[in-house]
Amino acid sequence: MIKTSFRPRAAAIAALAILPAAALTAQPVPGAFTVVETGRSYAELQEAVNAVGNARATIRIAPGTYRQCAVQEQGVIIYEAAEPGSVTLAGRSCEGKAALVLRGTGAEIRGLTFSNLRVADGNGAGIRLEQGALNVAYARFENSQQGILSGNDPNGRIYITRSTFTGLGTCENDAGCAHSLYIGDYGSLTVRESRFERGTGGHYLKARAAQVTIENNSFDDANGRTTNYMIDLPAGSTGRIANNWFVQGRDKENYSAFIALGAEDLLHPSDGLKVENNEARFVPGLTRQSAFFADWTGSTIVMQGNRLAGGIRQYEQR
């Protein structure tokens, strides 16, 4: 069932600066990883993480590109670039999973780039979040199988802002598709003022979170290859999808919808989900038919103020 009212207005999309590339740095680097609270520095990221233990601390990383990874077992750690955009973790995954494997109480990422992460099962990610809270700001995830992949934590929350996801996703492995951002059954997911672009398979944002806030982002599929939905909420969700900008490209595995709700096993109710003040179009010169919002749940979805190009139906129940 759909409740509609139209109040057109321009979507407010935040401008995102492209973070500069980090300079190549030899490994290991004495003093590269500093625990701010103690003033002690380490040559290996894992050494710094181990030194924090079950405490709360900030690891400040000197500018450079590091072929290193780390596993956080406990505590709350802030991973911070000394200069935003100057630090890259590239090409090395711990436990066959990610550059950062997080299963402590919480973590925060500030100004880091994650690049060229690939593993045998096709789920190589910048961040593998297995439990706990996660904040991400001014980060960049590029040219990997996935950007962020999470497990399930119904009491956990994830907040992502002003970050870029580019050149991510694949459906070429037996384990199933990888996506630019893939969140499991979490309590809440917030994504604001971020950019998704140049996908290489799968969805741009897939989440089984009970509550979502997806606002002021751009989903630019113009240069995507064999991509699927822009946003997939396969288990049902409540919350708000608002003020986002969408462009669907030519090379799609599935172009039937921009946003999908409840296409898999339902874990959460979706009544009252708000989809408002978004703008959606096709790449210039492309003519086709698609649904902006495809709904498998039959829930009451509040849709208003969405500006859609010709050929895009606002709502379709499936």
Image: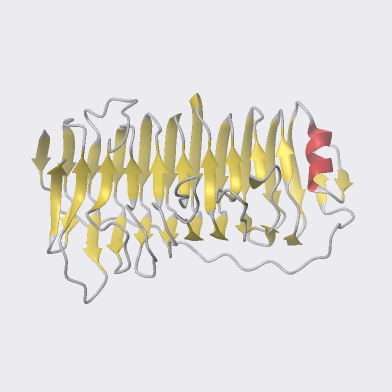
Residue at 43%, 31% in the rendered image: 188
Residue 202: percent from left, percent from top: 40, 53
- Tell which of 163 and 45 is nearer to you: 45
Q: In this view, does 271 lie above or below 160?
A: above
Residue at 52%, 52% in the rendered image: 146
Q: In this view, does 224 lie above or below 35?
A: below
Q: In the displayed orientation, state which residue is furthest to the bottom.
A: 285
Tell me the colour scheme of the image.
secondary structure
Residue at 90%, 55% in the rendered image: 30
Q: In this view, does 117 lie to the left or right of 195?
A: right
Give the total of numbered labels: 0
- Tell which of 201 and 309 is nearer to you: 201
The part of the image, by quadrant, that contains residue 83 is bottom right
Instruction: Locate the C terminus by quadrant.
Output: top left
Q: Is residue 60 above or below residue 130?
A: below
- Tell which of 276 and 295 is nearer to you: 295
Q: In this view, does 3 lie to the left or right of 187?
A: left
Q: In the displayed orientation, state which residue is furthest to the front.
A: 174
Residue 110: percent from left, percent from top: 62, 49
Residue 183: percent from left, percent from top: 46, 39
- Tell which of 78 and 226 is nearer to you: 226
Q: Is residue 313 left or right of residue 238?
A: left
Residue 247: percent from left, percent from top: 29, 63
Instruction: Locate the N terminus by quadrant.
Output: top left
